[in-house]
Amino acid sequence: MILITGASSGLGAALANQYSKAGKDVAITGRNQRRLEAVAADNRNIQPIPADLANPASISALFDQLKTPPSTIIHSAGSGYFGKIQDQKPEEIINLFNNNILSATLLLKEVVTRYRDQPINVVIVMSTAALSPKSGESTYCAAKWAVRALVESVRQELKAEKSPMRLIAVYPGGMATNFWNIEKDRDTSTFMSADEAASMLIQALTSAQHGYISDITISRR
């Protein structure tokens, strides 16, 4: 069974649909129950479970509701916020950090606590913003760099414990999804579609079944 977070739209929804059509059992989560149910509507093997990943109790309840332990967890939940630092609103910065840093940290803590003795693939989807700074994206880059540091540090902990869990970092380039609705003048004409990114990610993860690819960067040519 595959658990996908942030699956009410965008990459998460595309991954859920493609895995489901391939015959995989999938659990999807996000905060919007109606949108989750819409994703699951045409796929009998998708289980929608609403959850707030910034809430530890909600995360624990999510895993308690899974029908079977997951073989793969893909964390694609997150949000963006852009603009020059002097123009950014404090409340939006806090929201950005909660949706990206806090959610990834609490989810990873729960996953490692429950499953560190099992050979589970834990895939953390970030952004190429975690690899290089970008003007107008200061706090977004800061959030993604923080998640990257989290992933790389937890990897060392798992390695020291000889855990069979595999932690995989994914750095997708721009995707033409509703994510960019917050930035109306952004040109997304050269961006990947969510379906394209999902196909490439699934292919990369499938090819790594008998090995260990620690980092995956996805972008259109």
Image (spheres, grey):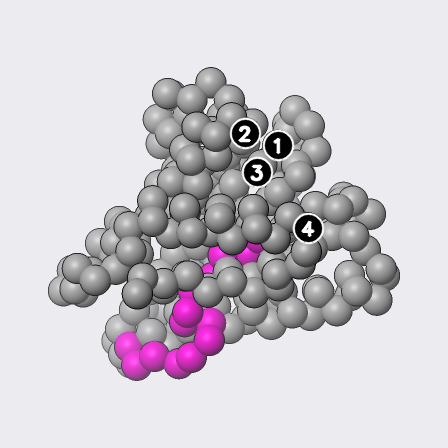
Look at discs 3 and 1 and give the one toward the viewer.
Answer: 1
Look at discs 2 and 4 and give the one toward the viewer.
Answer: 4
At 62% across and 32% down in the image, what residue appears? Answer: 1
Rendered view: 31 above or below 139: above
At 41% across and 33% down in the image, what residue appears? Answer: 17
- Assign a secondary structure to mark 3: strand
Q: Does residue 85 appear left or right of residue 24 in this picture?
A: left
**Measured from the top left, where is residue 67 in percent x and y?**
65, 24
**Measured from the top left, where is residue 195 in percent x and y?**
34, 44
The residue pinned by badge 1 equals 1
The amino acid on which the numbered mark 3 sits, given as a three-letter code, is: Leu
Q: Are marks 1 and 2 in contact (CB under 8 Å)?
A: yes
The amino acid on which the numbered mark 2 sits, given as a three-letter code, is: Lys
Rendered view: 121 above or below 38: below
Q: Are marks 1 and 4 in contact (CB under 8 Å)?
A: no
Say if residue 133 shows up in the picture: yes
Q: Which of the marked residues, 1 or 4, is nearer the chain's N terminus?
A: 1
Q: To which quarter of the image does residue 163 belong?
A: bottom right
125 magenta-colored: yes
The residue pinned by badge 2 equals 24
Look at discs 1 and 2 and give the one toward the viewer.
Answer: 2
Q: Which of the marked residues, 2 or 3, is nearer the chain's N terminus?
A: 3
The residue pinned by badge 3 equals 3
Tell me the magenta residue range: 123-136
